[in-house]
Amino acid sequence: MVSMLDSSCLTIKFLIVTIAQLNYTPIHKKVGGIGRGIAERLSELGAKVVINYSNSAEDALALVDTILSNGSKALAVRADLSRINEIEEMFTKTMAEFGQVDILINNAAVITNNPLSEVTEKEFEHQFSVNVKGVFFAYQQAWKHMESNGRIVNISTAGTKLTFPDMSVYASTKGAVEHLTRQLAKEFGSKQITVNAVAPGPIQTDQFFVGKSEEEIEFMKGMNSP
């Protein structure tokens, strides 16, 4: 777990964290949650951090300021992960600023909770474009720019193993990400780059509360360890 790390675990590394992406619900626009926690913690351990955001410039820049005030280095780069050219530009800017990429955290995702009968084509395509296509082509750029002994970590969800109401599309995208993790770990192994996925249970972030009733939230709380 990140909280168990100390500075001896991380000599200077150059890190890209994808944080927040545009969705249909305004609450998703805030830069925060898991990605913010990862960026802050690893910067405390000495990593130089590139923070990707889609439309939350104010929050992203505030996070950069926080990291800079703690004595590390950070850069905010806007990129819509559903667009391949913007993913490429994110890596180009990272290389121009820091000269290398050692760690990629594929954290950004969008979610729209709807029952099967109400899912629209737009919702379906948007979630797969960001959550799967975005991850795939970030992998492609990592292959191009990342040297040996790099690390790629994909943030998945417990929803791939458990069934939650109205999450069929989102869970499917994360199932695809987990399969990509297994498939591409073999390819990246030839470069001594590890590829792993983390599937957290319910975490109290802004995104967690979207589209859930109080009953559903209370039920999910009981799934976590005390």
Image: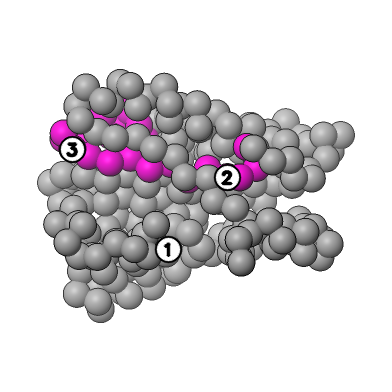
- Mark 1 and mark 2: span between their CA atoms? 17 Å
Tell me what residue is drawn at x 49 percent, y 37 percent.
Answer: 82
Q: Nearer the viewer, residue 50 or 35?
A: 35
Q: Which mark is residue 97?
A: none
Question: On the image, numbered disc 3 is attached to which residue?
Answer: 149
Question: On the image, numbered disc 2 is attached to which residue?
Answer: 157
| 190 with respect to 20 (left or right) | left
Secondary structure at badge 2 equals loop
Sort mark 2 into few (<14), some (14-19) or many (20+) by Cα contacts within 10 Å.
many
In the image, what residue type sits under mark 3? Asn
Q: Is residue 73 visible?
A: no
| 164 with respect to 196 (left or right) | right
- Mark 3 and mark 2: span between their CA atoms? 26 Å
Q: Name the outermost residue toward the bottom.
A: 69
Residue 4 image point, x, y percent: 34, 63
Q: Nearer the viewer, residue 62 or 135?
A: 135
Question: On the image, numbered disc 1 is attached to which residue?
Answer: 36
Residue range highlighted in magenta:
138-160
Residue 107 image point, x, y percent: 46, 48
Q: Is residue 65 visible?
A: yes
First of labels 3, 1 by sequence position? 1
Q: Quadrant of residue 144?
A: top left
Sort mark 1 into few (<14), some (14-19) or many (20+) by Cα contacts within 10 Å.
some
In the image, what residue type sits under mark 2? Thr
**Numbered label tally:** 3
In the image, what residue type sits under mark 1? Arg
Q: Note whether 211 is above or below 105 in the view shown.
A: below
Residue 105 image point, x, y percent: 37, 47
Q: Note whether 111 is above or below 46 in the view shown.
A: above
